Image (cartoon, grey):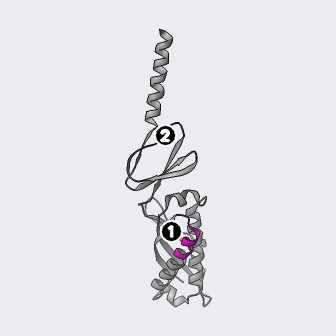
Amino acid sequence: KLGGKLLLILLAFLVASSAMTCFYTVDDKQQAVVTTFGKVTDITDAGLHFKLPFGIQQVQKVDVNVYQKIELGYATDKKGNALTNTKESTMITGDYNIVNVDFFVEYKISDPVAYLYSSNDPELILRNLIQSQVRNVVGSSNVDSVLTDGKENIQMQVKELVTEILDEYDIGLTLVDVRIQDSEP
C-alpha cells in the first residue's frame, strides 16, 4: 500500500510540474518565439499560451513594441547627466574641419525571429552601422551645414542609408529616428 501511495504522489507531482511548465504569458509589449526541438514553430502575441513541457518547446520573449535608444557621442547616466564620449563624437567634415557631433537614435525590433537568430548581437551591428554612416555623411558635408542649417539633411541622409542597409542585412531591427543632439566645432 505504501508503494502505491508513493507512486501516486510521484505521479501527481509530475503532472503538477508539467502543468506548471506548460503555460506562459506574453506581455502586451512583447512577442514570443516558440521553438520545438530548436526549430522555430510559432510566434505568439500578448496573452496566456500553452506549450509542450519538459523542454520539447522553448519560449523566448522579445520586446517588439518598445522604442529603444542608442546614444552616439554621449551617454546619459542614471541621474540624467550627459557624459561626453569624444571617441564617438569627434569627426572630420568634407572641408577638413573637426567637429563633435552627438546623435540620438531610436529603433525597435520588427522581426523577432530574425532578431534572435540572424546575428549574435544585432544592437552592436546597428550601432556600428550608424557610426559608419554618420561619419560618411558628416565627412561629405561642410562644417557650416553640420553646425547650422544642414542638420536636418544630415539626419535624413543617415536614416535613409542605415534603413537601406538594415533591409539588406535583415537582422530584425527597424530604424525609427535619427537626431543630432548637439554639434560644435
- Circle 1: residue type: Glu
Q: Is residue 100 above or below residue 65?
A: below
Q: Say few, some or many: other residues with alpha carbon within 10 Å of mark 2 (under 14 / 14 to 19 / 20 or more).
A: some
Q: Which residue is mark 2?
A: 52
Residue 20 is drawn in which quadrant?
A: top left
Majority secondary structure of magenta residues? helix
- Give me the C-alpha separation between circle 2 and circle 1: 41 Å
Residue 117 is drawn in which quadrant?
A: bottom right
Considering the numbered disc 1 on the image, is that residue within a helix, a strand or a loop? Answer: strand
Where, quadrant-wise, is the C terminus in this rendering? bottom right
Q: Position of residue 50 (x, y in %)?
A: 42, 42
Q: Over which residues does the magenta segment extend? A: 163-171
- Circle 2: residue type: Leu
The residue lying at 47 percent from left, 33 percent from top is 18
Closer to the N terminus: mark 2 or mark 1? 2
Q: Which residue is mark 1?
A: 71
Front one among 60 and 14:
14
Q: Position of residue 164 (x, y in %)?
A: 54, 76
Considering the numbered disc 2 on the image, is that residue within a helix, a strand or a loop? Answer: loop
